[in-house]
Image (spheres, coloured by chain):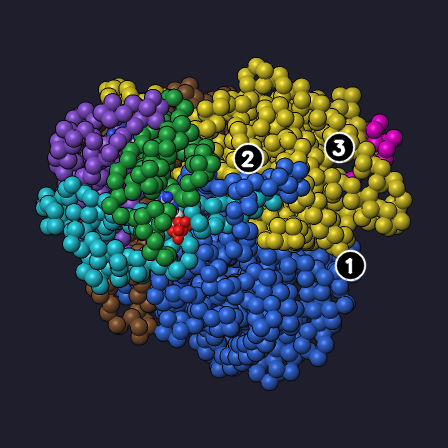
Chain colours: A yellow, B blue, C brown, D green, E cyan, F purple
Amino acid sequence: MEISAVDVWVMVSAALVLLMTPGVAFFYSGMTRAKSVLNMLMMCFSALAVVAVVWTLWGYSMSGATGIAQLFGNPFEAFGLSSLLGSGDLISAGFSATFAIITVALIAGGIADRAKFSGWLVFVPIWVTLVYCPLAFMVWGGGLLSAEGEFGQVFGEAIDYAGGTVVHINAGVAALVLALIIGRRRGFGVDPAQRPHNIPLVMLGATLLWFGWFGFNGGAATDAAEAGVIWISTMVAPAAAFIAWIGVEWIRDGKPTSLGGASGIVAGLVAITPACANVSPLGALLIGLLAGVASALAVGLKYRLGYDDSLDVVGVHLVSGLVGTLALGFFALPVDGEGGGLFYGGGADQLIAQSAAAAFAILFTGILTTIIGILIHRTVGMRVAEEDEITGVDLTEHAETGYEFGGLGTGGSFRPHPSSPAAHRRTPEAERVNS
Amino acid sequence: MEISAVDVWVMVSAALVLLMTPGVAFFYSGMTRAKSVLNMLMMCFSALAVVAVVWTLWGYSMSGATGIAQLFGNPFEAFGLSSLLGSGDLISAGFSATFAIITVALIAGGIADRAKFSGWLVFVPIWVTLVYCPLAFMVWGGGLLSAEGEFGQVFGEAIDYAGGTVVHINAGVAALVLALIIGRRRGFGVDPAQRPHNIPLVMLGATLLWFGWFGFNGGAATDAAEAGVIWISTMVAPAAAFIAWIGVEWIRDGKPTSLGGASGIVAGLVAITPACANVSPLGALLIGLLAGVASALAVGLKYRLGYDDSLDVVGVHLVSGLVGTLALGFFALPVDGEGGGLFYGGGADQLIAQSAAAAFAILFTGILTTIIGILIHRTVGMRVAEEDEITGVDLTEHAETGYEFGGLGTGGSFRPHPSSPAAHRRTPEAERVNS
Amino acid sequence: MEISAVDVWVMVSAALVLLMTPGVAFFYSGMTRAKSVLNMLMMCFSALAVVAVVWTLWGYSMSGATGIAQLFGNPFEAFGLSSLLGSGDLISAGFSATFAIITVALIAGGIADRAKFSGWLVFVPIWVTLVYCPLAFMVWGGGLLSAEGEFGQVFGEAIDYAGGTVVHINAGVAALVLALIIGRRRGFGVDPAQRPHNIPLVMLGATLLWFGWFGFNGGAATDAAEAGVIWISTMVAPAAAFIAWIGVEWIRDGKPTSLGGASGIVAGLVAITPACANVSPLGALLIGLLAGVASALAVGLKYRLGYDDSLDVVGVHLVSGLVGTLALGFFALPVDGEGGGLFYGGGADQLIAQSAAAAFAILFTGILTTIIGILIHRTVGMRVAEEDEITGVDLTEHAETGYEFGGLGTGGSFRPHPSSPAAHRRTPEAERVNS
Amino acid sequence: MKLITAIIRPDKLADVRSALEEFGLQGLTVSEASGYGRQKGHRQFYRGAAYTQDLVPKLRLEILAEDFDALRILEIVLESASTGEPGDGKVWVTTADQVIRVSDRAEGAEAL
Amino acid sequence: MKLITAIIRPDKLADVRSALEEFGLQGLTVSEASGYGRQKGHRQFYRGAAYTQDLVPKLRLEILAEDFDALRILEIVLESASTGEPGDGKVWVTTADQVIRVSDRAEGAEAL
Amino acid sequence: MKLITAIIRPDKLADVRSALEEFGLQGLTVSEASGYGRQKGHRQFYRGAAYTQDLVPKLRLEILAEDFDALRILEIVLESASTGEPGDGKVWVTTADQVIRVSDRAEGAEAL
Ligand SMILES: Nc1ncnc2c1ncn2[C@@H]1O[C@H](COP(=O)(O)OP(=O)(O)O)[C@@H](O)[C@H]1O
Ligand SMILES: Nc1ncnc2c1ncn2[C@@H]1O[C@H](COP(=O)(O)OP(=O)(O)O)[C@@H](O)[C@H]1O
Ligand SMILES: Nc1ncnc2c1ncn2[C@@H]1O[C@H](COP(=O)(O)OP(=O)(O)O)[C@@H](O)[C@H]1O
């Protein structure tokens, strides 16, 4: 079975989507304070590692194998992916893994600067198993929300080409729930130190996200015309959202910011995700504008409502995910002259289907994440002690600091690696410092 | 219409070229001072966003639709790209957009540290419409400089495979013109503070540029042999230019620098751009060497001649763009035994064609950019006030700073987002600080 | 000859692998002190440039042309690659170049902070010619270790799909040898300043490595099922190794670190390199776990044994390269029901072949690198003076510093470029500073 | 004139500043410093090797004040910078022979 | 011996230094600091939330000088660091009991 | 009480600290500084333009000590920070009117 053009496209797309999770990591970690940059990187990279393993073991199977009550696939059917050996399906198993990975990583933005790493490591495999896999199955795997599913038959099948509900609404709701469970950062809404420490790093993250998103949106295309529509949508929607976001800032605050620009790019990408294959280039442009305005206004809500979704997963992913999902009710192009959104004379059917799917995803994720989050928070704990928050989670959770540019790292003493005999001579300095 | 191998290659290439503009952003912004890093990022990213929108609306049409007097395409023919829906042409519309985007972003390097962001945002859409689109049409869209064009018929058709004239000479001249219009940075040629603030960031930029350039040069290939030649050229020319540049430095200054190495890579990439498909690997190697030497010597010209092309768009893009464009007159391989450069017995025809096209591009861009630039500078203004330049354009244009590594970000006060009710309690601190 | 899907895949893969060398550069340079960040970047980028040129001239030919005594290919057969013009083989020449490049760059990690740049620039072309090209020929080009080679016939043909011996064991041994020849850093094992200066940069490096590795492992695949196996292996092995490495740290040191996580990713990628196409997803997962544990334990060896392999090329690349190479003796899947590793009932044959190839590579590289290294060290010199090491090799070898975040770069004076007339007015400041 | 120098915990700056502002102090100078003392640092790990970083990040405040105000300011700093734990830092007072404002050359109390 | 400490605008360093060098001063020490005072800072925005950063970046110069030179140096610093606007900074003088050069233990005026 | 301020080479910190600890000093404060003086800086090149950076990175130590110990500490710093080459730095001593520990308000010798 020689490699086909589509195989190549899916492999490239899968690698691009995998790259997006480090993209999220940089995007987020540039926005934290310098003393928690590594912790944020670790939350994202550990999501990558843990979900990749879970997916290989049972996650793929749960999101795509024979369904159990339209809710999730049988986890044992393709356990370990061994049953796929010899077929080309491993390529699409890889592609689908990368979506699960990034969804989990996105959640980390809600709990920056204060999450307990051990709690997070417990949360990740449980959440991906109980929330992500079922939702992916229900929407994309032939489950409840698909055309054949019971929900889909009642409300109509929603369009979610690349993950408006499964990825963005899902992650946004989960982040909100976790942020509420673990509570606000010390100094939330008051402390001027809670500002981004490295905006070029944020820009790098946005760059990798945009680049990877061509695979994220495009990887499932099999038709050249569809692929072209997706490519253009994925270019123009974030471009328009960039303009919209900095426009809102310019009017409201008097200055257009680069953090706003980067955030606009991501908001536009989020909004176009469900819609990328089903709108015209002008439709994509308008959806981008809408998303940029909506998210630029929404990121302030946390101060008004008092939840500390630190890096605005709600304001960007939930809000723009909703914008894109609902916009399809208006902007969806008819297929073969049939259906389409309100603006194309397709009536309200599509809008109803989109709204129903979004509502379902919000409820489903909201409820399950609340249960999982509270259980873990009450047992393992999901938040560090206050003094650790003050010191910084890089030092207290990972025993590292992100940067050492100056000469002051020369203080203290060095003890060779434990495996070294020298390590067993205990120096006075080593004694003096509590570990 | 199933996705073909070429479709995949073009989509991947388009994503790669899109990535190059952030590459330019990092390459440039690492070279500015720390206090203008974000402004440089914003100039490049805003070029990306604005040109992506312009291209979707009328730019694509102007560079490729039915010509008007061999000068530019009809902007209404494919307005909004709607007429391309259902065909595979949207893929190539995306690919071509990325070239327009990066050309505009390149110009920003000439006016670092002092450009007024509002002026830039006015300049971008006007310049891409009036300068880039027509030039792209004239060279690649069947216009004046093409084989059928009146200019092309007189001087012969120049080879410009991937953008020596359209991208690099074009951007280099425009940057020179803008730098002259807005004037030198305060302290130009005297102030030792005008040195790069983050060379690893410059290296990252060069990395993304090189990586993306495989798409930039290769994306239009349809034949495997040609694609192979392009791939090798795109690898070996910048490699040779790296060696040449640091060699010049080693001899002249006594030390090979990493900024020189990174600059050499870019110079080599620029030079091979027009020539990538039409020279042998050894030819590419030699063009790389030439470009490295020429640009390493040329970056000093600004001090001699007194123009402040801050980040050397002239020294790198114009000079190496000319090296590559003219080198084809010597190194071009014959096609089917015919033609070719001077070294292959093809006579001076190719050299004449190349020189004529380069001269045309310089004049065309030079004149139009001067008019556009002066008009905008006189109305909106393209340069910040001197005190803003001293404070730093990140703070004055974008109300942000790039980095906060230390503890001193803890000064000052925080005011929640305007959308929050808390924001309307005016604190004494908030009063004390002028916005 | 139209571009085929495989052509596209190889071109994309080649670009991905080229990107890995900057990936190594960032991964390594984030781990050095701030005062040698540029030198590390330059060692890697100069390896890239020099090897790209060598490969174009004679390297490709030596690793793949008609063999001379089963040891290396005839360097003149495809000198300058001109003989490949017109064929699609230039694409694979490009792909193979990127492997040579990264292998050389990897070595730089062993001699961080103290290597003399001129010595390194002499070492690179000699080593790639005398060590890499022959080994690549012997393993992949039909030489001594291939199925037809004399060594291969005695011990059986080892599986080295993407470079366990040729790339990782090879680089690891060479780094060890050079580290021994040039000696330890001042303060090795004592000075607490020898800690990473920029861990987000390390993470960026690991990110580019992982992303590029999909091309590194996958680029040679021609069959969709094989490509799928490779894709999954390349995802799950580093994921498992990440978990294993931070697990070891958590148990041993009490904290999981981000540097450990990044190192685990690389260790897992290294280990799966030879095995990527020949193990099941579960096998890849287990190999990843093994590699993570082995390398996490091995990085301490240098303190115990006293060699200063500064950035752990031995601990990561040699050790995990061995893990992956030997693991194939156990985990290799049978092909068409025949052979396979011990765990699949294939007997010890594969393990013997793997061990023999690994031993051969260690000896071959060890001996040749010792000779080359000592000769260069005694003549050109491979280590800077002690005072230069204290000042920092960025300043002394490259006359630059990596970062200037603060206002203190305002000290000193500026002298325009030598090509400028102003440069010949010697200012008092310029006199006062020794060059 | 007195110069009051205080080494404090970085996260206490906001408190100290608002206390001083309430008192009516018009300005101060802050810089980054690190210190060691009774407070212990953190052990860090890089690839398993342990680095005992016992230099703890601190801020240094410098406050010029009239002799008359100095004591009061000292008191305010001591109050607002304190957690009661080791590591709160030190405050010391030295005598400045002269203090001049650069912009208008006002001297002494006028310069503040 | 006197120790002259000056808080100045970062972009004035070059001027101050060349003025001092002209006078014949052999060395000085510079460090980064931030200050607040009459000069106002900038309001910054991050996702719309306003941060009023009123700590303004400054440089601190420390100059050891003989009593005899101190006044002259003071004058030069005041001259060369001034723009006449608020935010130019302060200069103060304290008395050093002893000054020693590390390399050869030269003391007092010889140590400079 | 005395305040000993020392400008030293960054790579000498470890030596100075262990010498001081041996003597029994309980704490000190370090900060980054740059200096110019007899020691020459490095010429740097960026795209060929030469930057003569003559500000050399240094560290500033501040050590509070009883009058009695000050001389001994001075001696230890001079000893351990010295290479004998220009650029080793300067040490100076000033008098602190008062020293107070923030956490428990211990004064004078007790505060150290
Ligand atoms: N003798 C000293 N001279 C100068 N600074 C000191 C001295 N001792 C301590 N410090 C500074 O005070 C800080 C706090 O000291 P420490 O002993 O940890 O706690 P405390 O001030 O509560 O006794 C140190 O980090 C250091 O910066
Ligand atoms: N009381 C003070 N003690 C110490 N430093 C001060 C004091 N007041 C002002 N400064 C320093 O002087 C700088 C300039 O002060 P400012 O009041 O803004 O302007 P000016 O010096 O022109 O009055 C401040 O940024 C701060 O660093
Ligand atoms: N007059 C001075 N006032 C304050 N600091 C000084 C003075 N002269 C020198 N220094 C500091 O001492 C450091 C070393 O001085 P330098 O003249 O290079 O060597 P040395 O101390 O051996 O004479 C300088 O970098 C600077 O920080």
**Distance of label 2 from label 3 (alpha carbons):** 41 Å
State if disc 3 and disc 1 touch (CB < 8 Å). Answer: no
SS of the residue at dot 2?
loop
Residue found at x 60% / y 31%: A308
> Please, which chain is the residue tagged with disc 2 on?
A
Q: Quadrant of the N terminus of chain C?
A: bottom right
User: Ligand 1 is located in which of the four quadrants?
Assistant: top left
Disc 2 crowd rating (10 Å Cα; few below 14, some 14-19, many 20+) is some
Residue found at x 14% / y 28%: F68
- The region drawn magenta spans A149-159
Mark 2: amino acid:
Val
Q: Which residue is mark 3?
A: A139
Residue found at x 75% / y 21%: A68
Give x and y (percent) for residue B264: 40, 61
Mark 3: amino acid:
Val
Q: Which residue is mark 1?
A: B82
Eye-nearest disc, 2 or 3 = 2
The answer to whether one can see residue C297 in this image is yes
Q: Which residue is mark 2?
A: A190
Give x and y (percent) for residue F32: 30, 42
